[in-house]
Image (tube, coloured by chain):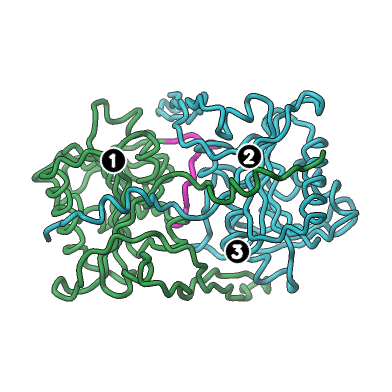
Chain colours: A green, B cyan
């Protein structure tokens, strides 16, 4: 397969390199990723500033293109300006930290896959549920198995998959669950601090999910399953659309 | 009503002030908005940097709180740290420029409303389909009519509405259409330029929508209708979820 590989942790992030190393023998990989970390940028795009693109090496060998923008920018500029022949897949990750529930909306990793889907390409976002120096080996291996499966079964439909992998030894992973995104809020708080000049500032902290339904990405991941959630870039709430269509708003 | 008013064009943007002026006699308004323009930030949140909050005046009178973050940050910090009593509505806008179709995903204006909905509040995003020094009078008047309608009909359900208003004289507006978000791609291009130091850079440019279906926000707005699209923060593609649940991926 010809694969555009990107992420939101930056072009030299371990998760991206692990995926590259696991896939580069069997697939043709084009790396186009942010020059630095762009986490929690959501589906941001850069329109008020110009974008710059820089060729980068890993060791002494050409590795890919570093872009001065967001993950969504990377996908757009890769497909329109950098890669001049068709690709089979947009692959984003492996992200350091899960992207489940409400965090799907905040995630730069997921937005890169969504952008791929908007532009008409099959796409996959992959995240590993661990922040502290995780080992990406198993997660990268799972992605290579998934690509073999997709290829072997000739699945070419226009999917956008959000995949989250528990940080567990392989034999402790319970299996794969196909689940919807949880929509329940996170428990969040702001931590107040005073800077050395006497001024107040705030750190935003996410504590935990309120979701309890085992048939959601949030709970299935926590229970030790690899979660796969197909996404589509449509935020319309159709059942409410039908209800409010009878509103007669005078103006 | 007690209303949290925010936007993505910054706390002193004309569209926000127009809404404030149109509503402040009848409603209690709390302004918490980005200190500067944060357009196309999508549903970004600020986690790698601290947030600062500054009281600001308009003329000589206290106006609201300027936050060093994104629209979604503003809604979170307003509801958790700044406003210490219940509110009835999160209102975001009036944005300079429409937020329809795929742009709904890129929009900071919409993400503020979505964040309100995630946190359990009714919310509305309002955008005006004009970039060049628009007059926000009619759009602000329409929002005041809508709030009167919601209040008069005691509509309290947990809605998140994305409203777009054509930039036309009031008598030329054809009415209101309740329509889904278009999911069709934009025609986009990158304009290449060379800086004074001889280096290549790119400007990202959106040209036009490819959508043709009149029953979408994109086309209805272009045809002269006010569009109302109810949103929900769930990107799951349910019909594909059912299909792929039978995938047996060996790993």
Residue visible at 63% across and 69% down in the picture: A201
Residue visible at 32% across and 53% down in the picture: B241
Task: Say the numbered circle drawn on residue B166.
Answer: none
To which quarter of the image does residue A1 belong?
Answer: top left
Q: Residue B244, how many percent across, how many down?
A: 25, 52
Residue visible at 47% across and 29% down in the picture: B186
- Image position of B44 (left or right of A90): right
Does B223 sit above or below residue A178? Answer: above
How much space separates mark 2 and mark 3, taking CA atoms? 37 Å
State which chain disc 3 sits on.
B
- Image position of A220 (left or right of B145): left
Instruction: Report the residue marked by disc 3.
Output: B51
Magenta span has A48?
yes
Q: State whether the magenta stretch is mostly helix, strand or loop.
A: loop
Q: Residue A38, how many percent across, how many down?
A: 42, 53
Residue sitting nearer the eye, B124 or A81: B124
Residue interval drawn in magenta: A40-51
State which chain disc 1 sits on.
A
Q: Residue B227, how many percent across, how many down?
A: 65, 37
The local secondary structure at tag 3 comes to loop
Q: Tally the numbered discs.
A: 3
State the quadrant of the C terminus of chain A.
top right
Which is closer to the viewer, label 2 or label 1?
A: 2
CA neighbours of label 1 inside 10 A, class few (<14), some (14 to 19), many (20+) = many
To which quarter of the image does residue A64 belong?
Answer: top left
Residue sitting nearer the eye, A225 or B62: A225
- Image position of B230 (left or right of B35): left
Instruction: Report the residue marked by disc 1.
Output: A122
CA neighbours of label 2 inside 10 A, class few (<14), some (14 to 19), many (20+) = many
Instruction: Report the residue marked by disc 2.
Output: B178
């Amino acid at each position: 397969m010809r694969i555009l590989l990107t992420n939101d942790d930056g072009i030299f992030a371990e998760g991206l390199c692990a995926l590259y190393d696991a896939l580069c023998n069997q697939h043709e990989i084009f790396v186009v990723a942010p020059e630095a970390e762009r986490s929690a940028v959501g589906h941001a795009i850069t329109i008020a500033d110009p974008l710059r693109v820089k060729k980068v090496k890993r060791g002494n060998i050409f590795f890919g293109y570093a872009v001065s923008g967001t993950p969504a920018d990377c996908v757009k500029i890769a497909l329109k300006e950098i890669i001049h022949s068709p690709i089979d897949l947009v692959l984003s990750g492996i992200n350091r930290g899960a992207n489940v529930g409400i965090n799907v909306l905040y995630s730069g990793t997921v937005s890169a896959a969504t952008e791929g889907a908007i532009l008409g390409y099959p796409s996959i976002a992959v995240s590993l549920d661990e922040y502290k120096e995780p080992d990406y080996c198993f997660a990268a291996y799972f992605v290579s198995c998934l690509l073999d499966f997709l290829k072997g079964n000739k699945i070419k439909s226009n999917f956008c998959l959000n995949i989250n992998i528990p940080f567990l030894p392989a034999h402790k992973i319970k299996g794969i669950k196909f689940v919807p995104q949880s929509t329940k809020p996170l428990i969040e708080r702001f931590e107040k601090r005073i800077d050395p000049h006497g001024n107040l500032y705030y750190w935003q902290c996410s504590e935990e999910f309120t979701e309890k339904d085992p048939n959601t990405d949030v709970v299935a991941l926590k229970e030790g399953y690899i979660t796969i959630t197909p996404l589509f870039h449509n935020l319309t709430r159709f059942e409410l659309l039908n209800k409010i269509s009878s509103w007669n708003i005078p103006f």
